[in-house]
Amino acid sequence: MSSSNSKFEPFNRGLPRTVGACMAAMLMLVMSSSCVTTEAATGGWVYICTGPKAKVYHSTPNCRGLKKCSGSIKKLPASSVNRRPCKVCH
Ligand SMILES: [Zn+2]
């Protein structure tokens, strides 16, 4: 156990954990920011109700259809929402 431990130590020192975490965070940041930019550029944000009866998406959080939402209202990119558009606000 001690011999294999000392074997891996130089490797651990050369690649500190912080670098890996930082790179992962940067990757996520780049991915999410590029994703947001794309969606914002296309204006593809929609609002959905998370309630069990909600089957549509809305173009505005102030829609009449969302007033009776039994869950909470979520803002999502239109491309990720697999619902029909709301008849009230579309
Ligand atoms: Zn609506």
Image (tube, rainbow, N blue to C red):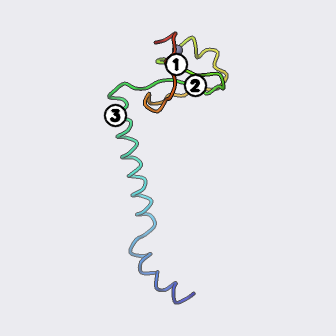
**Amino acid tagged 1:** Pro
Mark carried by residue 38 = 3
Q: Which residue is mark 1?
A: 61
Eyeballing the image, is 15 above or below 70?
Answer: below
Label 3, secondary structure: give it.
Answer: helix
Q: Is mark 2 within 8 Å of ligand 1?
A: no
Horizontal and vertical percent position of residue 53: 65, 22
Q: CA distance from mark 2 to mark 3?
A: 22 Å
x then y, percent, for residue 31: 38, 45
- Which mark identifies residue 53? none
Mark 2 and 1 residues: CB-CB less than 8 Å, in contact?
A: yes
Looking at the image, which is closer to me, 87 or 38?
87
- Horizontal side of residue 22 vs 64, given as left or right: left
Q: Nearer the viewer, residue 41 or 80?
A: 80
Looking at the rendered structure, the kind of residue marked 3 is Thr
Of the residues under marks 1 and 3, which one precedes in the sequence?
3
Q: Residue at x 37, y 24 (%)?
A: 43
Query: First in sequence: mark 2 or mark 3?
Result: 3
If the image is split into quadrants, where does the N terminus sit? bottom right
- Residue for point 51% across, 11% down: 87
Name the one closer to the observer, 57 or 1.
57
Q: Is mark 3 within 8 Å of ligand 1?
A: no
The percent position of residue 26, horizontal first and vertical second, equals 38, 52
For the point 34% across and 34% down, the residue is 38
Residue at 34% from the left image edge and 35% from the top image edge: 37
Choose mark 1 or mark 3, whichever is in front.
Answer: 3
Mark 2 to mark 1: distance in Å? 7 Å
Which residue matches tag 2?
A: 73
Q: Give the structural element (helix, strand or loop) at label 2.
A: strand
Q: Amino acid at mark 2?
A: Ile
Give the crowd class for mark 2: few <14, some 14-19, many >=20 residues within 10 Å. some
